[in-house]
């Protein structure tokens, strides 16, 4: 299987690139942020708990996000693999993902890390906040807090994957196409099977 972890700070462009990579390599896109926003929209109890934390720029508990991923991995589907977007976000989540994939006789193939500096991230998120309807994108203070949480709780994951030889940093600045091209060429170095095209051109 081909399992990609798309990693990077809030506003690095993970969502945009994950959709494109999922199409190129025929992967199932799993975004914990999207899954949580679905729960919020559906007004579930889980959504209520998650929504309060998300609005403050805090992480949702490992337990909640791990069980969401677990149930998605259990669904039978015809795919060559998954692209994880916004997950894992803590070392505990990274370890849990390894365990879950092992159960499915699989593993993380590569961790692609989009690098973008803090000033650019804040600008992008404030801009996104004008149209996204996301409360966590509205205020500079919340955005800065999310970046601090990322630096404190999420960045240590890099060591976890680096020690396994799976860490690939990619600049997250440039055009969307250039970034996709860079990400795709890393994936191709580890996955040399023919690529299934979904182009309707
Ligand atoms: P971004 O990367 O732009 O911040 P996401 O959609 O990935 O956006 O996540 C939005 C929010 O959802 C996060 O700030 C966090 O509160 C919550 N969240 C998403 N994924 C996770 C996760 N794996 N662990 C904990 N919280 C998460």
Image (cartoon, grey):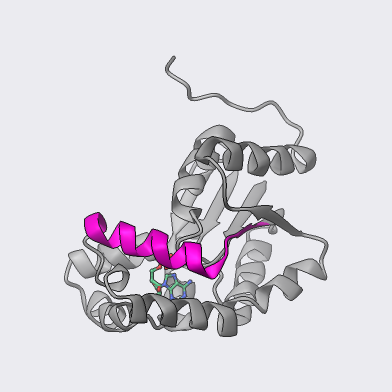
Task: Give the answer, above or below, for where 163 lies relative to 17.
Answer: below
- Seen from this angle, which residue lies furthest left? 43
Residue drawn at x 60%, y 69% is 97
Q: Regarding ligand 1, which quadrant of the image does it lie in? A: bottom left
Residue drawn at x 47%, y 64% is 121
Residue drawn at x 28%, y 62% is 129
- Seen from this angle, which residue lies furthest top? 201
Quadrant (top left, top right, bottom left, bottom right) of the C terminus:
top left
Q: Quadrant of residue 177?
A: top right
Of 172 and 77, nearer the camera is 172
Task: Give the answer, above or below, for where 40 lies relative to 183.
Answer: below
Residue 56 at x, y percent in the picture: 31, 83
Residue drawn at x 45%, y 47% is 16
Residue 87 at x, y percent in the picture: 52, 66
The answer to whether residue 122 is magenta is: yes
Residue 39 at x, y percent in the picture: 26, 67
Image side of residue 196 versus residue 160, left or right: left
Q: Quadrant of residue 105?
A: bottom right
Task: Give the answer, above or below, for where 41 lies relative to 177.
Answer: below
Image side of residue 47 versus residue 93, left or right: left
Residue 196 at x, y percent in the picture: 58, 26
Q: Which residues are magenta?
A: 112-132
**Overall secondary structure of the magenta stretch?**
helix
Whether residue 23 is visible here, answered yes or no, is yes
Of 134 and 103, nearer the camera is 134
Whether residue 76 is visible here, answered yes or no, is no
């Amino acid at each position: 299987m081909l399992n990609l972890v798309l990693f990077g700070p809030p506003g690095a462009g993970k969502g945009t690139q994950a959709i494109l990579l999922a199409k190129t390599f025929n992967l199932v896109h799993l975004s914990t942020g999207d899954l949580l926003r679905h729960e919020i929209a559906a007004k579930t109890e889980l959504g209520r708990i998650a929504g309060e934390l998300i609005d403050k720029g805090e992480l949702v508990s490992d337990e909640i996000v791990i069980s969401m991923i677990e149930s998605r991995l259990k669904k039978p589907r015809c795919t060559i693999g998954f692209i994880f977007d916004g997950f894992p976000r803590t070392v505990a989540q990274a370890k849990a993902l390894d365990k879950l994939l092992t159960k499915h006789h699989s593993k993380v193939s590569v961790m692609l890390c989009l690098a973008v500096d803090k000033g650019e991230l804040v600008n992008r998120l404030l801009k996104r906040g004008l149209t996204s309807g996301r409360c966590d994108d509205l205020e500079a203070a919340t955005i800065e807090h999310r970046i601090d949480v990322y630096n404190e709780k999420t960045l240590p994951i890099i060591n976890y994957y680096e020690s396994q030889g799976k860490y690939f940093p990619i600049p997250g600045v440039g055009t969307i196409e250039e970034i996709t091209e860079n990400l795709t060429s890393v994936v191709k170095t580890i996955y040399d099977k023919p690529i299934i095209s979904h182009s309707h051109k």
